[in-house]
Amino acid sequence: MSEPADIATLSFEQALAELEQIVARLESGQAPLEASIAMYERGAALKAHCETRLEAARLRVEKIVVGAGGAQGSEPAEFT
């Protein structure tokens, strides 16, 4: 089994797909306890990463500058 990717480098879609796989494995009940705990921890980190990415997208959409002719551009969201 390959080393899991650093969560910070994952796109929203990649993180969500991995989170869905983890949920499916945990729901199956087939993983040993220690592996389940490790998967749960990674899943929690993936969930937080997805929430951060979604919030960033929401902020970016809110910063779209709308003029008389419609959307004129956007301002990137700032992250701290």
Image: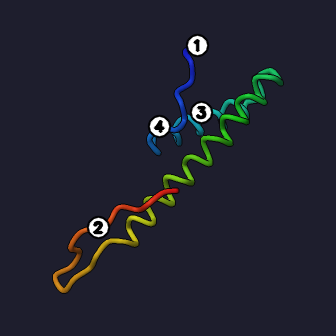
How far across and how far down the image is residue 66, in percent? 26, 79
Per the image, label 2 sits on a secondary structure element best described as loop
Q: Mark 2 touching mark 1, by CB under 8 A?
A: no
Q: Amino acid at mark 1?
A: Met
Alpha carbon distance from label 4 to label 3: 15 Å
Q: Report the mark closest to the observer, 3 or 1.
A: 1
Side of 39 relative to 71 (left or right): right
Q: Report the mark closest to the observer, 4 or 3.
A: 4
Crowding at dot 2, Cα within 10 Å, few <14 / some 14-19 / many 20+, comes out as: few
User: Which of the two labelled residues, at mark 4 and mark 3, occupies the earlier sequence position?
Assistant: 4
Q: Amino acid at mark 4?
A: Leu
User: Which of the two labelled residues, at mark 2 and mark 1, occupies the earlier sequence position?
Assistant: 1
How far across and how far down the image is residue 43, in percent? 66, 38
Residue under label 2, please give it.
74
- The image shows residue 3, relative to residue 49, as above or below, that is above
How far across and how far down the image is residue 22, in percent? 64, 33
Per the image, label 3 sits on a secondary structure element best described as helix
What residue is drawn where x is 21% and y is 79%? 70
Residue under label 1, please give it.
1
Side of 77 relative to 36 (left or right): left
- The image shows residue 46, relative to residue 68, as above or below, that is above
Side of 40 relative to 7 (left or right): right
Side of 64 relative to 5 (left or right): left
Residue under label 3, please give it.
21
Q: Amino acid at mark 3?
A: Gln
Residue that sits furthest to the left in the current view: 69
What residue is drawn where x is 38% and y is 67%? 61
Alpha carbon distance from label 2 to label 1: 42 Å
Per the image, label 4 sits on a secondary structure element best described as loop
Q: Relative to the observer, which residue lies in front, 23 or 50? A: 50
What residue is drawn where x is 59% and y is 38%? 19
Residue under label 4, please give it.
10
